[in-house]
């Protein structure tokens, strides 16, 4: 016998769903200028960054190495001036949407970057990536793992790949709101740099 839901009847919740959220956090960035015949100059500043939350917990905690070493990778949504266009591209990729952005945010095998190098934000340094699989009711980040930027090999023996499944409507709502915000930031940045 097959259970059938009549029109208008509430569907039972899907087990094992995670909730995607985000929060502002910060990290310390140190930039060093190497100078010939003089002491190198270093400057340190706090950089605000949007961090993914999975069921209210930082996603980077799930990527922590067994020896306690934290995941230094992060989203492309932070206040460094060259990141907002890449932020929009990375968010659109999480909805499986192609966009006009030229910033590479996915690998040639179709896997999408979730967290990127904390210094340059470039895939070539490697990234935490996943296959984004969209169904009628869910979105999966399938086989989340570190991916090498040069060879595109997936996985790190110390951190096992895992999958997260989200309810599609709230997931898309979260990502769409972030796209709107970061698109506006990108446009503001372009306007401020093009004004003489």
Image (cartoon, grey):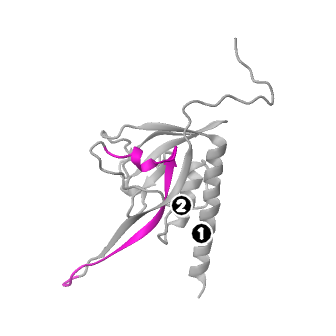
Return the residue nearer the eye: 17 or 116.
Answer: 17
Q: Is residue 158 left or right of residue 77?
A: left
Is residue 121 part of the magenta span, yes or no? no
Query: What separation in Å lies between label 1 and label 2 (alpha carbons)?
Result: 10 Å
Circle nearer the N terminus (1, 2): 2
Magenta stretch: give its range.
36-65
Q: Is residue 86 left or right of residue 62?
A: right
Number of labelled discs?
A: 2
Q: Is disc 1 surrounded by few (<14), some (14 to 19) or many (20+) residues within 10 Å?
A: some
Name the residue at 37% across, 64% down. 119
Image location (x, y in percent) of residue 163: 48, 37
Q: In this view, which residue lies farthest toward the bottom?
A: 196
Q: Quadrant of the N terminus?
A: top right
Image location (x, y in percent) of residue 144: 44, 41
Q: In this view, which residue lies farthest toward the front?
A: 56
Name the residue at 40% across, 47% down. 61
């Amino acid at each position: 016998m097959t259970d059938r839901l009549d029109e208008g009847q509430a569907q039972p919740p899907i087990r094992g769903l995670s909730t995607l959220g985000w929060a502002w956090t910060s990290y310390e960035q140190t930039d060093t200028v190497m100078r010939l015949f003089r002491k190198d100059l270093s400057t340190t500043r706090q950089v605000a960054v949007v961090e993914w939350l999975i069921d209210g917990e930082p996603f980077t905690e799930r990527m922590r190495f067994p020896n306690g070493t934290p995941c230094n990778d992060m989203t492309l949504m932070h206040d460094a001036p060259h990141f907002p266009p890449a932020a929009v591209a990375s968010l659109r990729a999480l909805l499986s949407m192609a966009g006009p952005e030229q910033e590479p945010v996915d690998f040639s095998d179709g896997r999408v970057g979730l967290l990127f190098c904390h210094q340059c934000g470039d895939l070539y340094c490697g990234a935490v990536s996943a296959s984004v699989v969209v169904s009628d009711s869910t979105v999966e980040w399938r086989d989340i793992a570190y991916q090498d930027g040069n060879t595109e090999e997936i996985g790190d023996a110390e951190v096992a790949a895992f999958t997260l499944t989200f309810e599609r409507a709230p997931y898309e709502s979260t990502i769409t709101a972030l796209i709107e915000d970061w698109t506006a930031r990108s446009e503001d940045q372009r306007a401020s740099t093009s004004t003489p």
